[in-house]
């Protein structure tokens, strides 16, 4: 049976079978009596005279087979901590955790789960290396290390991306391209990053090399496109530094436009290799829909989209707001955001390449104000400097989109001590099979 058929069978019966009961250790030491055994003649099956007894049959307990994981490398790569837990149980666990953390501040509503919690990641990264015998491998770093765990297919990654990565391994062998060695700094090929459009079907392949020269690059691109004609663009990224960062600064487009487009909440977005874009498009539409619902926009509001990235939340909210001011520190993301506004014919959104905290403080100093602030910080949350700048601007509402309930609770504690009351929080399961959970929360000025 192929791995794909196995997966489909597992997918239909996703609830993992409980593992067999383990004998509980009592903490007491068992005394063991050692006696000297008399010699026996195993050939004749005889013992010294007077001690010939029929051997009693050994009592054996039928061992229950251990529950087989859905993934052959589960527990090694560290990417899917909850993969073998039934999905309903995953949701209950996350609901309980979020409710416990946010209970001191606001009501937590029922978590929004996925109908199909598999193959949702539209961004797939694979690190490349080789075995001692020179065999090319690709996969993911083992958690907390730089040891590569070989991966052929992943149950949370886009299947098209996994197939492309497998074939790139074969092409490296055919073209005799050496993979990069972190210890020696020798070798060329480091990583592959693939981004896929959920609605558009477009696919970007980013080849990350240690130097800008890819041997026989034209033939390599042709060979890859022959195997996968669905690829719409191929980008060569150069990362010559000894760093844990995947992408370097310099890029060259080898084929196509150098970016892909996809649809989200009725808007079309341009996505480049370095742009921040949520990895689960199905759940992102639910998350952003809830965030805009919490804002309660009427068409008269002045809205700030802090940490705007490529402009997703602000552009989606623009239909229901009078004006949107979007701020982002990453220049590449701002460039994409401006292109996205033009692509969608949106004219009531302005973009600024600046630190959002500094920008809002400058607005407050200039006597400017805002009705609603959307904030979608990284997993580490926001620091007090940023939060104080939000408070200085004095918006009526703050809609906080968070990918870590722990840092969300920490930031709610600060905001509720400085003039705001948390009203509602809605968990959204953006990352099935993992311990992470996205949330959006509404705060209103007291």
Image: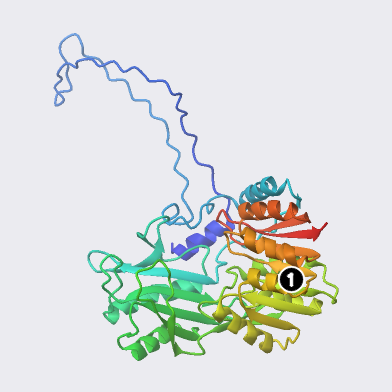
Task: Tell me which corner region of the image, top left, top right, bottom left or bottom right, holds residue 300.
Answer: bottom right
Q: Residue 194: x percent and y percent?
A: 48, 75
Q: Is residue 250 above or below residue 192?
A: below
Q: Quadrant of the C terminus?
A: bottom right
Residue 107 vs residue 356, the one in the foreground: 356
Q: Residue pushed farthest front?
A: 365
Q: Is residue 29 above or below residue 142?
A: above
Q: Residue 409: x percent and y percent?
A: 66, 52
Examine the rendering and report whether any part of residue 294 can be seen: no
Q: Residues within 10 Å of mark 1 (few under 14, many from 20)?
A: some
Which residue was labeled with disc 1?
364
Q: Residue 279: x percent and y percent?
A: 57, 69
- 33 vs 264, left or right, is left
Residue 386 vs residue 337, the one in the foreground: 386
Task: Tell me which corner region of the image, top left, top right, bottom left or bottom right, holds residue 419.
Answer: bottom right
Residue 161 vs residue 445, the one in the foreground: 445
Q: Quadrant of the N terminus?
A: bottom left
């Amino acid at each position: 049976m192929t791995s794909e058929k196995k997966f489909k069978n597992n997918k239909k019966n996703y609830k993992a079978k409980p593992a067999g009961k383990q004998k509980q250790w009592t903490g007491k030491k068992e005394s063991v009596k050692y006696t000297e055994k008399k010699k026996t003649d195993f050939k004749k099956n005889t013992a010294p005279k007077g001690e010939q007894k029929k051997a009693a049959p050994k009592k054996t307990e039928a061992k229950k087979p251990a529950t087989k994981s859905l993934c052959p490398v589960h527990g090694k790569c560290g990417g899917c901590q909850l993969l073998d837990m039934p999905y309903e149980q995953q949701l209950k666990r996350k609901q309980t955790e979020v409710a416990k953390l946010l209970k001191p501040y606001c009501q937590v509503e029922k978590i929004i789960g996925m109908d199909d919690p598999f193959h949702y990641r539209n961004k797939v990264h694979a690190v490349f290396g080789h075995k001692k015998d020179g065999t090319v491998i690709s996969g993911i770093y083992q958690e907390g290390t730089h040891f590569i765990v070989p991966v052929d297919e992943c149950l949370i990654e886009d299947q098209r991306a996994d197939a492309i990565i497998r074939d790139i391994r074969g092409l490296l062998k055919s073209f005799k391209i050496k993979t990069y060695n972190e210890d020696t700094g020798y070798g060329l090929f480091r990583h592959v990053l693939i981004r896929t459009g959920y609605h558009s079907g477009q696919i970007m392949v980013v080849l990350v090399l240690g130097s800008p020269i890819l041997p026989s690059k034209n033939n390599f691109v042709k060979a890859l496109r022959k195997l996968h004609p669905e690829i719409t663009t191929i980008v060569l990224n150069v990362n010559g530094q000894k760093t844990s960062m995947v992408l370097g600064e310099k890029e060259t487009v080898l084929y196509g436009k150098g970016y892909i487009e996809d649809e989200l909440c009725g808007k079309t977005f341009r996505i480049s290799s370095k742009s921040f874009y949520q990895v689960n498009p199905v759940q992102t539409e639910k998350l952003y829909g809830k965030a805009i619902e919490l804002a309660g926009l009427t068409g008269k509001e002045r809205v700030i989209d802090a940490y705007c990235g490529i402009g997703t939340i602000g552009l989606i909210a623009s239909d229901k707001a009078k004006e949107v001011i979007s701020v982002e520190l990453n220049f590449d993301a701002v460039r994409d955001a401006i292109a996205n506004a033009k692509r969608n014919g949106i004219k009531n959104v302005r973009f600024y390449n600046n630190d959002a905290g500094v920008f809002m403080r400058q607005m407050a100093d200039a006597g400017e104000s805002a009705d609603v602030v959307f904030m979608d910080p990284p997993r580490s949350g926001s620091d007090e400097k940023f939060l104080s700048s939000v408070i200085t601007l004095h918006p009526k509402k703050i809609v906080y989109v968070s990918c870590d309930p722990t840092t969300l609770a920490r930031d709610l504690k600060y905001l509720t001590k400085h003039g705001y009351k948390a009203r509602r929080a809605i968990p959204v399961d953006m990352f099935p099979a993992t311990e992470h959970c996205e949330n959006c929360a509404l705060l209103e000025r007291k």
